[in-house]
Image (cartoon, rainbow, N blue to C red):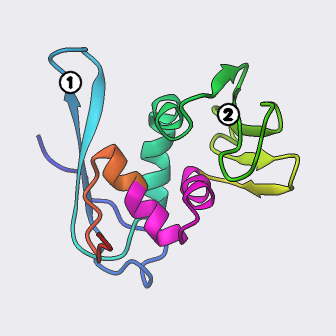
Amino acid sequence: MQCRKKRSPAPRANAGNRACIIPTISNTTGRVSFYHKKARGPLDFDLINRMALAAFPAVLARILPRGKIIGREYVSLNPTRADHRSGSFKIRLFGSRGGSWADFATGDRGGDPVSLVAYLENVSQGEAARMLARMLGLETGGRHNE
């Protein structure tokens, strides 16, 4: 199988950034997953967000285990504050706004899985992208703060 070479839409920011995405089928579940091998360089936020959205219900179940799916949204208690009733913290699962999230009680909001992890873990966007990439089994390249 031959890899597709992809280039970022911003060539200066991601000069030489190449990705190879190889679909694989699990022997145990029969599901298609993607093995991603990335050259060293800047983090590919767009790829990390796309891969997280492809497995978003499972990602959310891992980072917000007490939530539940209601319609197109994942509803959970907000672990960053003393939230006693679910309903104000929602994450959009599907559609054109998939990955967007908001806490309607505090006004905090974001537009993608990386910003959600950054908010929940109180870390930078870069560290959140690395955490999410590790959770998804992606090689991120660049520096690691482990």
For the stretch drawn in magenta, the main secondary structure is: helix
Image quadrant in which the N terminus is located: top left
Magenta segment boundaries in residue numbering = 113-131
- Classify residue 33 by image quadrant: top left
- Could you classify mark 1 by the number of other residues whose Cα lies within 10 Å: few (under 14), some (14-19), or many (20 or more)? few
Query: Mark 1 sits on what residue?
Result: 25
Earlier sequence position, callout 2 versus callout 1: 1
| Residue 27 appears left or right of 122 | left
Label 2, label 1: how many angstroms apart (C-alpha)? 25 Å
Query: Mark 2 sits on what residue?
Result: 95
The three-letter code of the residue at mark 1 reads Ile
Query: At which x and y percent is residue 49?
Result: 50, 51
The three-letter code of the residue at mark 2 reads Gly
Image quadrant in which the C terminus is located: bottom left
Pick whichever, 123 or 18, lies toward us: 123
* Residue found at x 74% / y 37%: 90
- Could you classify mark 2 by the number of other residues whose Cα lies within 10 Å: few (under 14), some (14-19), or many (20 or more)? few
Query: At which x and y percent is residue 138?
Result: 28, 52
Label 2 element class: loop
Query: At which x and y percent is residue 81?
Result: 74, 51
* Residue found at x 77% / y 48%: 102
